[in-house]
Image (tube, rainbow, N blue to C red):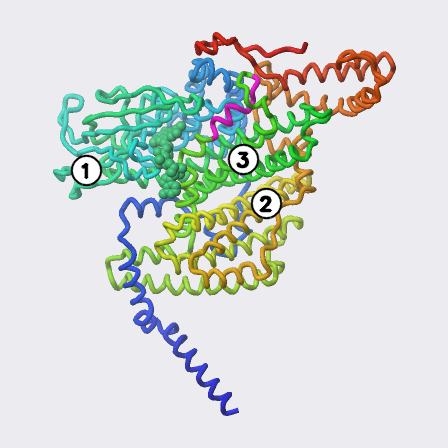
């Protein structure tokens, strides 16, 4: 008994030593926070202005919840569903429809190597270049969601026209002027951009600085010079840019360069920082170069340069007050624009691929069966359907957040990265299913242009490897974490008393947060997350999904903290660990977007296979990413402990089953409301130059003919039909009463019409060799 009392006393003393300092702020600051702050200050390099601005740019919304370990699902579900106004819907149904009818991938890439002149004129005259410019300046004043819908639809018709429209409406002079321009700049340029009088481009990339764009060597020296006959303060700018979209046809060049002020004419600093200016391309000294040829995508793209070109100070966006603020402007505009542009164009291309490939897999028969019935093809179709469900959900939620005033820097990176990656998977699967039909170019090829466009999407607006390895988790961990940014700010604070106070508050908040996640992760792991509370009003069939996502969010929060604590600054170089943690955050966002979509659409029963497949696949990806982090975590004892907490009973998630996959694939190969919802917004008017629309219109007839075809094939196989080809045997089947006259006519018609969709174009050899405008021919039915 005495021994037990002694043990108790010793334990109490130990606890007192540990807890009392924590309860006494002055003591804990002296004993814990101050030494730690000093150590952090020593190991953390001073952040440059550029780094700080990149980190602080944009806003945090539901990504903060996902990082917290216990997402407030009610908050996500309470965001109103995006809707188009009557005017936006009218624009989609009329102007966008008209533009779609004017262009085609084939004509732009092979005949004009550009948009047809009439399309250029229509785009400029009907406000396509100024969709996001407010009506007060003559623009269309559309929401981000409407902008996204327009780009999505255009991408289902012609990738080049979509790029031409999306660039001025995302990261370009219009967006920069709206947020940072002076009143005079807005009054002058916005109406001109809205009416298509000016065509803008934005030039950041230099041959020496692509991904590392903040390192551009392009520079502007503050000096006095002559402008409009007067001596004014301005900058002498030298630049060399490449890859600039719309550059070759632009009349207004948005230019990023680093400003220097050696004579202190504009302030008291020599290296002012990255600055953005607007320069008319007609200005003396501006060299608009020739054209690049981005993988035969043929939208206008090229280099431009200038040497010692004098520009007045009021050409700097926002005027002299915004000298050196260019990087922050770009980061914030990118945060919004990146969430709309490529997510929308890639979703459009994916919708096109899913709808057409689903139909093609039904129309195309081999081994006397529609190819979509073969399990191998079915597997690819399943992935296509599930991936598109993910893409459309993430695209829509991101646009909705932008419309709510968010500049989602982390989420827009996730949307860009994962929507383009899933888009690439879809197009690759579609190409495999289409076989030679996808490979031979010509007006009847409905996939080749999207396939060629894919690497462009992967590379621009933050190349995907970089975004995955460096940005998503790197920025997410700092921006979305409730305490890390505050801790970092405290280490950079010059006032030492304030620094200690702020650091202490953030550190102990952080420790409490980490302790909660530790306990929650263990509890959710042991109970399989079955007791997690979710809002009462979610769809009962999706309740379990919210519980699973909460468990993974908790694991992510815990591992992220441990990784930051044990690896510190080295985590930035451990890109494979960082990328996997980013994948978990990304998949959590994607899963949340799917759950929101399901609720927003009124929980359609017919969508359940899509949601179930896509959600399980996403959870499985998250599990494998977490497993990858733990397997490769450099501090092994820490990894063992984390594995015990995160996977107490091992990895329990499995990929979606084949049976579920079959239900998804079946949705793609027949007309139904789930397929219509999934591919909503596609250009499918069955006009003569739109094989996509006509193939879809044929699908019901193909399906109606299938039982008749089976009857015919059975008779043919039994040898009772005379003749050596289809036509002869069909005539014999009708003569012998195997098929009625109407049935034989149906089979003949379907075979005749579907021949167009399985045919490919061929060209005159001499024309091809000479690179001439050659007219393709599509072989008709023999
Ligand atoms: C068709 C097209 C249109 C474009 N339009 C414009 C435009 O309008 N305006 C404009 O200013 N620019 C534009 N760009 C430029 C575009 O933004 C750059 O191409 C992009 O930033 C990548 O730069 P890079 O091509 O030089 O690749 P690099 O920077 O050389 O990168 C090569 C590879 O290395 C990877 N990488 C680089 N650093 C890291 C890292 N730290 N960790 C992991 N991986 C890394 C990248 O992800 C990439 O995979 C366009 C480019 C193209 C091709």
Q: Ligand 1 is located in which of the four quadrants?
A: top left
Density class for disc 2 (Cα within 10 Å; few <14, some 14-19, many ≥20) is many
Residue that numbered label 3 is attached to: 425
Residue 78 or residue 13, whichever sits in front: 13
Inter-mark Cα distance, 1 to 2: 51 Å
Inter-mark Cα distance, 2 to 3: 14 Å
Going from N to C along the chain, the mark reached first, 2 or 3, is 3
Residue that numbered label 1 is attached to: 260
Tell me if residue 545 comes above or below residue 746 in the rendering: below
Residue at horizontal 17%, vertical 43%?
A: 269
Question: In the visual, does 415 lie left or right of 311?
Answer: right
> Label 3 CB, ligand 1: below 8 Å?
no
Q: Position of residue 13 (x, y in %)?
A: 42, 82
Tell me if residue 442 comes above or below residue 707 in the rendering: above
Helix, strand or loop at label 1? It is strand
Q: Is residue 448 magenta?
A: yes
Going from N to C along the chain, the mark reached first, 3 or 1, is 1
Residue at horizontal 37%, vertical 27%?
A: 137
Residue at horizontal 52%, vertical 20%?
A: 100
Q: Are marks 2 and 3 in contact (CB under 8 Å)?
A: no
- Where the C terminus falls, by quadrant? top right
Dot label at residue 617 = 2
Q: Position of residue 524 (x, y in %)?
A: 57, 61
The magenta stretch is: 444-454
Going from N to C along the chain, the mark reached first, 1 or 2, is 1
> Label 2 CB, ligand 1: below 8 Å?
no
Question: In the visual, does 551 lie left or right of 325?
Answer: right
């Amino acid at each position: 008994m005495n021994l037990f009392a002694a043990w108790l006393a010793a334990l109490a003393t130990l606890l007192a030593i540990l807890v009392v300092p924590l309860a006494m702020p002055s003591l804990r600051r002296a004993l814990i926070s101050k030494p730690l702050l000093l150590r952090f200050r020593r190991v953390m390099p001073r952040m440059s202005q550029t780094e700080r601005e990149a980190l602080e740019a944009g806003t945090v919304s539901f990504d903060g919840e996902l990082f917290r370990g216990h997402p407030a699902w009610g908050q996500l579900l309470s965001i109103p569903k995006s809707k188009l106004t009557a005017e936006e819907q009218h624009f989609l149904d009329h102007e966008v429809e008209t533009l779609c009818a004017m262009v085609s991938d084939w004509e732009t890439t092979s005949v004009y190597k550009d948009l047809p002149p009439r399309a250029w004129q229509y785009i400029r005259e009907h406000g396509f270049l100024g969709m996001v410019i407010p009506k007060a300046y003559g623009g269309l004043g559309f929401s981000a969601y409407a902008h996204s819908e327009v780009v999505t639809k255009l991408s289902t018709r012609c990738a080049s026209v979509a790029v031409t429209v999306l660039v001025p409406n995302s990261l370009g002079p219009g967006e920069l002027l709206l947020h940072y321009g002076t009143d005079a700049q807005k009054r002058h340029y916005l109406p001109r951009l809205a009416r298509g009088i000016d065509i803008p481009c934005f030039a950041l990339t230099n041959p020496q600085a692509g991904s590392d764009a903040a390192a551009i060597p392009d520079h502007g020296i503050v000096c006095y010079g002559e402008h409009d006959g007067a001596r004014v303060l301005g900058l002498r700018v030298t630049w060399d840019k490449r890859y600039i979209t719309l550059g070759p046809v632009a009349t207004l060049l948005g230019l990023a360069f680093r400003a220097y002020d050696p004579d202190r004419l504009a302030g008291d600093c020599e290296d002012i920082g990255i600055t953005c200016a607007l320069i008319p391309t007609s200005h003396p000294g501006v060299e608009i170069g020739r054209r690049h040829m981005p993988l035969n995508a043929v939208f206008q793209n090229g280099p431009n340069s200038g040497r010692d070109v004098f520009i007045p100070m009021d050409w700097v966006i926002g005027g002299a007050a915004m000298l050196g603020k260019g990087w922050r402007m770009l980061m914030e505009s990118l945060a919004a624009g990146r969430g709309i542009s490529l997510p929308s164009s890639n979703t459009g291309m994916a919708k096109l691929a899913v709808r057409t490939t689903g139909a093609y897999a039904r129309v195309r028969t081999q081994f006397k069966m529609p190819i979509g019935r073969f399990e191998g093809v079915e597997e690819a179709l399943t992935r296509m359907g599930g991936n598109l469900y993910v893409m459309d959900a993430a695209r829509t939620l991101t646009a909705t957040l932008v419309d709510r005033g968010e500049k989602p820097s982390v989420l827009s990176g996730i949307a860009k990265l994962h929507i383009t990656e899933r888009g690439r998977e879809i197009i690759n699967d579609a190409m495999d299913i289409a076989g030679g039909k996808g490979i031979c170019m010509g007006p009847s090829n409905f996939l080749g242009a999207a396939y060629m466009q894919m690497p462009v999407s992967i590379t621009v607006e933050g190349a995907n490897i970089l975004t995955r390895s460096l940005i998503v988790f790197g920025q997410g961990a700092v921006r979305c974490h409730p305490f890390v940014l505050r801790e970092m700010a405290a280490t950079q604070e010059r006032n030492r008393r304030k620094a200690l106070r702020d650091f202490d508050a953030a550190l102990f908040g952080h420790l409490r947060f980490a302790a909660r996640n530790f306990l929650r992760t263990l509890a959710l792991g042991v109970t399989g997350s079955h007791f997690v509370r979710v809002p009462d009003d979610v769809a009962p069939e999706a309740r379990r999904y919210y519980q699973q996502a909460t468990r993974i969010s908790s694991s992510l929060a815990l591992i992220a903290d441990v990784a930051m604590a044990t690896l510190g600054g080295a985590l930035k170089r451990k890109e494979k660990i960082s990328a996997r943690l980013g994948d978990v955050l990304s998949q959590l966002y994607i899963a949340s977007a799917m759950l929101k979509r399901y609720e927003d659409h009124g929980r359609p029963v017919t969508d359940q296979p899509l949601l179930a497949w896509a959600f399980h696949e996403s959870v499985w990806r998250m599990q494998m990413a977490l497993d990858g982090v733990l397997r490769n975590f450099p501090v092994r004892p820490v990894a063992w402990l984390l594995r015990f907490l995160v996977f107490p009973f091992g990895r329990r998630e499995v990929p979606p089953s084949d049976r579920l996959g079959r239900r998804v694939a079946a949705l793609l190969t027949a007309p139904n409301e789930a397929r219509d919802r999934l591919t909503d917004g596609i250009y499918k008017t069955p006009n003569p130059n739109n094989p996509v629309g006509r193939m879809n219109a044929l699908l019901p007839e193909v399906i109606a003919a299938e039982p008749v075809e089976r009857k015919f094939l059975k008779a043919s196989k039994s040898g009772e039909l005379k003749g050596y080809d289809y036509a002869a045997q069909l005539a014999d089947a009708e003569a012998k009463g195997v098929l009625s006259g109407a049935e034989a006519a149906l089979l003949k018609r379907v075979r005749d019409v579907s021949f167009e969709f399985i045919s490919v174009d061929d060209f005159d050899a001499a024309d091809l060799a000479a690179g001439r405008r050659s007219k393709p021919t599509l072989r008709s039915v023999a």
